[in-house]
Image (cartoon, coloured by chain):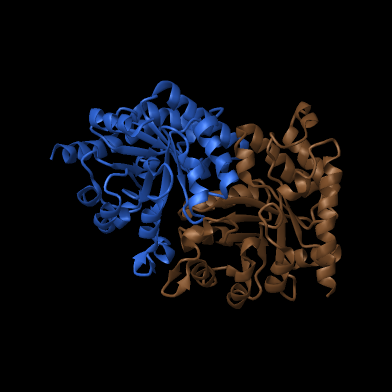
Chain colours: A brown, B blue
Amino acid sequence: MTTNQLINQIKKKQSFLCIGLDVDLNKIPKHLLKEEDPIFAFNKAIIDATHHLCVAYKPNTAFYEAYGIKGWRSLEKTINYLNKNHPEIYTIADAKRGDIGNTSTMYAKAFFEDLGFDSVTVAPYMGKDSVEPFLTFKDKHTILLALTSNQGAYDFQTKTIDGVEVYKEVLKTSKTWKNSENLMYVVGATKAEYLAEIRQIIPENFLLVPGVGAQGGNLQDVCKYGMTDDVGLLINSSRGIIYASQSEDFAEAAANKALALQAEMKDILAK
Amino acid sequence: MTTNQLINQIKKKQSFLCIGLDVDLNKIPKHLLKEEDPIFAFNKAIIDATHHLCVAYKPNTAFYEAYGIKGWRSLEKTINYLNKNHPEIYTIADAKRGDIGNTSTMYAKAFFEDLGFDSVTVAPYMGKDSVEPFLTFKDKHTILLALTSNQGAYDFQTKTIDGVEVYKEVLKTSKTWKNSENLMYVVGATKAEYLAEIRQIIPENFLLVPGVGAQGGNLQDVCKYGMTDDVGLLINSSRGIIYASQSEDFAEAAANKALALQAEMKDILAK
């Protein structure tokens, strides 16, 4: 998917919501455990109930890998279901990969070609030649970790290299990489106060913003400092939406939570 | 596996060689493509021919993920084969994972419990709470990326935070984390000249050293600066061993390459 197609979807739906499909068998409604593939059954119900309210879905691969081959099959079924039934929706493999060049190429093929995701999250620690293999794929985005939503972000990301924070060094350096127009960045909603300075370095790139909801980030603050003329934000909520209820009404409850966020986004877009 | 069990194996085999099982269907002998599971058939032949010469095997998960569910089945068969037939051999899932706390726990379970690896490689960018979930597992090691073998290592890892290189900051900070005795570190053989200073910070932890062979690193230099009283090194070679021949004699050719490295290691250990 191109960035313009994503922007058009945002305008049409009046939403820049991304729903994180982080499926934990201990947290989904018990009645689904009787299904042949409970993870896919859960995802399908969530997607059917929320696809008109969000513009993106983001399965975190850890939750699928934890169930081995069965989990990978659930992931494959989920992305296939999305690509077949909702091809207009943007898909993110939250995999946080990154390795030396020839190995990163294998990861890129796995997520972009075999699974057919529109984007994948990538860790920056190994530098240019670990990220550029992802950037060569046409109409695919590479979402680089910049300033993450967790407490550990303060261990290294906010330390300063010659007066410049590590995450800013990542932003600045990555702009010089080949096909850097295909970059988006992860910036946690819990770090909204950093967004104004981040926008000085990357005024236009889309940001994937986790941490609204369960982790305590605030949507209004994120939009105030991070929004661009083309919106430029994908706000992710995972647990806050998909685990809104653990009863048979879980999908409806998820849709209600998604609707509340979408309504808030519509208001912000109208300003 | 405990660190002592690993050290005992090294002394017994007079080897600290790790063989990287980075299987690319475009590079393995053509006759194997007729097999039901060519990747596992290749790994099994390599393991059968080399297990007495090395102390560890390291599949890089990217090469398995690239083939989807089939690839994950090959990875599962490979680790099961190792754990059943060669339980004394140390196993490394080269996965370079790392995410927020509850998600890292899912990754740790996937690699330590479900697949049964002895260790997993982890990226440090997201800090303490992304790594500590891995460290809680008893008799398992977490191998943290410190100074990688690729050119991109100079983009961020060697930059200085208040005069201290980022990779050194990673070493120093990670020592303060809970269960840090379960840490090993990745240091590329192509950066052997950094090892003396690294050993001042982490005098005892094992290092996983990729980059000998195809990437140009030198075994003698790595040992000169990186070896401890308990050896403290796992030297990895992937392509240089497993792709020594693309003919029917590929396993024998791999064993010859492994033997050459093991012989060199034996000489070093005798000094």
Instruction: Looking at this view, name the residue that lies furthest to the bottom.
Output: A200
Residue A179 position (above or below residue A27): below
Instruction: Looking at this view, name the residue that lies furthest to the top.
Output: B85
Q: Is residue A232 visible?
A: no
As drawn, is B155 to the left or to the right of A50?
left
Q: Is residue B51 visible?
A: yes
The residue that appears at 70% across and 68% down in the rendered structure is: A221
As drawn, is B204 to the left or to the right of B160?
left
In x, y percent, where is residue B2? 36, 31
As drawn, is B169 to the left or to the right of A119?
left
The image quarter containing residue A191 is bottom right
Q: Quadrant of the C terminus of chain A?
A: bottom right
The residue that appears at 65% across and 59% down in the rendered structure is: A140
**Viewer-closest of A57 and A167:** A167
The residue that appears at 68% across and 38% down in the rendered structure is: A24
Residue B263 position (above or below residue A229): above
In x, y percent, where is residue B223? 22, 47
As drawn, is A64 to the left or to the right of A8?
left
In x, y percent, where is residue A186? 61, 61
Q: Quadrant of the N terminus of chain A?
A: bottom right
In x, y percent, where is residue B27? 46, 42
**Viewer-closest of B179 and B50:** B179
The image quarter containing residue A5 is bottom right
Disc count in the image?
0
Instruction: Looking at this view, name the residue that lies furthest to the left.
Output: B271
